[in-house]
């Protein structure tokens, strides 16, 4: 008890105030809402329920929402730290629990803080390709988002009176104003040094970005190389065939030379990785819808595109009618005018608009129509 009192007597920084906490809380509310919305969008794009036919346009929609998710998340780090610092003395409030209601309130705050830290830490580790946990990132990040956002809503309801008091007021104290500006600047800098992973003109500033969009074979990042995928040895095998099978009138089996002889189209589309980096490239290849028409598949069919890669989560992807009927969707043979190299998916890779990078399957050898 004495110890606690001595401790709380130490929390004397004048920068702390209800108004400062409220202001930081408001900014966090905005950034969490953005993260939750863009995160759900990303999740249902990558794992759509059977009935969901999400559109293939706007072409860059996924690129923008996922960029906001990752860059916004990084920019939230200084904000969350500032907020924790601002409210930290409350941890030592005595008595810790005044009533059942107060206990419930604190429990939600605990969920909110622990959940928010969990989301930021696992998110940052994920984009740094550091999978040092025993659980699956996607499921954990997805379900924790609901806990955090639910706890946030409860917290806002509980704190509403305080929040409203300070919402539109000006921060008079110059030191506190400076403190808030500093935090805002720190968030801005965090965003600026990562945004280059998707906004090309900022590429040079992207010192914090795990991927620089200009670095990689053929000037484009590679998420999984042919070597890592275990197929380096069979690239260029003359026995290669692209097979179109399943619910079709005429199954196809095409050699690489056959593919080269089919009508070629050139489109500009980004690869937009779920990890936030993206880069626009010019792709040349065969329209997927031409191939399905040639095989006599229904325009309403669902397709599965499969890779030469034998195992791995991303060796195949589903592509639904709005995407594969889109004239921009190609089985690409070239990137920026040059034959794809092994790491970018030689002989053929899928590229479609408004679709996460994980679903842009490389080393395609089979299209299954169902
Ligand atoms: N077969 C296969 N295709 C794949 C992957 C993979 O692991 N295996 N990774 C995907 C991911 S996560 C991304 S972001 C893009 C990146 O394409 P790039 O390596 O050509 O830049 O490829 C996708 N295609
Ligand atoms: Mo990716």
Image (cartoon, rainbow, N blue to C red):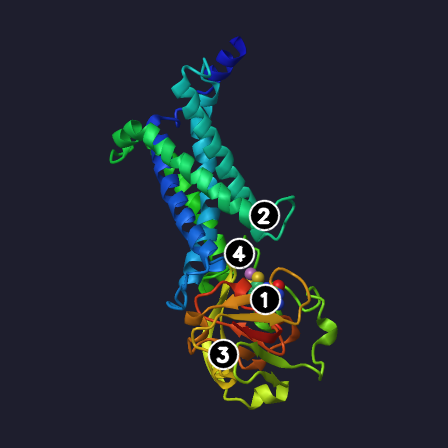
Q: Which residue is mark 1?
A: 316
Which numbered tag is attached to residue 275?
A: 4
Q: Is mark 1 within 8 Å of ligand 1?
A: yes
Taking the spot 41% from the left edge, 25% from the top edge, the residue there is: 105
- How far apart, in angstroms, are the residues tagged by discs 4 and 2? 10 Å
CB under 8 Å between callouts 4 and 3?
A: no
10 Å crowding of disc 4: few (<14), some (14-19), many (20+): many
Name, please, the residue furthest toward the bottom: 261
Taking the spot 45% from the left edge, 22% from the top edge, the residue there is: 89
CB under 8 Å between callouts 3 and 2?
A: no
Give the mark nearer the N terminus: 4 vs 1: 4
Where residue 317 sits, quadrant-wise, is: bottom right
- Of badges 2 and 1, the one in the foreground is 1
Q: Which residue is mark 2?
A: 125
Q: Which residue is mark 3?
A: 288
- SS assignment at label 1: strand
Give the mark nearer the N terminus: 1 vs 3: 3
- SS assignment at label 2: helix
Q: Residue 126 location, x and y as percent? A: 58, 50
Q: Nearer the viewer, residue 203 or 349?
A: 349
């Amino acid at each position: 008890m004495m110890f606690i009192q001595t401790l709380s007597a130490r929390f004397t920084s004048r920068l702390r105030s209800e108004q400062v906490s409220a202001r930081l809380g408001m900014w966090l509310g905005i950034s969490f809402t953005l993260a939750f919305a863009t995160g759900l969008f990303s999740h249902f794009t990558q794992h759509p329920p059977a009935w969901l036919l999400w559109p293939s346009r706007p072409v860059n929609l996924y690129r923008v929402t996922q960029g906001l998710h990752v860059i916004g998340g990084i920019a939230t780090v200084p904000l969350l730290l500032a907020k924790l610092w601002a409210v930290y003395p409350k941890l030592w409030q005595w008595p810790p629990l005044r009533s059942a209601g107060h206990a419930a309130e604190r429990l939600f705050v605990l969920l909110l803080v622990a959940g928010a830290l969990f989301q930021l830490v696992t998110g940052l580790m994920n984009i740094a390709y550091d999978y040092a946990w025993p659980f699956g990132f996607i499921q954990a990040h997805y379900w924790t988002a609901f806990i955090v956002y639910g706890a946030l809503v409860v917290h806002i309801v509980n704190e509403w009176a305080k929040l409203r008091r300070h919402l539109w007021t000006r921060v008079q104290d110059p030191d506190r104003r400076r403190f808030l500006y500093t935090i805002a600047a720190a968030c801005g800098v965090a965003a600026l040094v990562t945004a280059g992973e998707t906004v090309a003109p900022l590429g040079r500033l992207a010192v914090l970005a795990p991927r620089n969009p200009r670095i990689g074979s053929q000037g484009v990042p590679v998420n999984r190389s042919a070597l890592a995928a275990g197929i380096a040895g069979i690239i260029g095998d003359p026995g290669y065939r692209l097979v179109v099978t399943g619910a079709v009138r005429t199954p196809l089996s095409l050699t690489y030379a056959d593919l080269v002889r089919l009508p070629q189209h050139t489109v500009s589309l980004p690869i937009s990785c779920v990890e936030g980096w993206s880069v626009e490239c010019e792709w040349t290849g065969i329209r997927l819808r031409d191939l399905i028409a040639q095989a006599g598949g229904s325009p309403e069919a669902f397709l599965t595109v499969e890779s030469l890669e034998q195992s791995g989560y991303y060796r195949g992807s589903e592509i639904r009618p709005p995407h594969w009927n889109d004239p921009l969707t190609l089985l690409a043979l070239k990137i920026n005018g040059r034959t794809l190299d092994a790491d970018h998916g030689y002989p053929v890779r899928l590229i479609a608009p408004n679709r996460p990078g994980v679903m842009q399957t490389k080393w395609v050898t089979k299209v299954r129509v169902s």
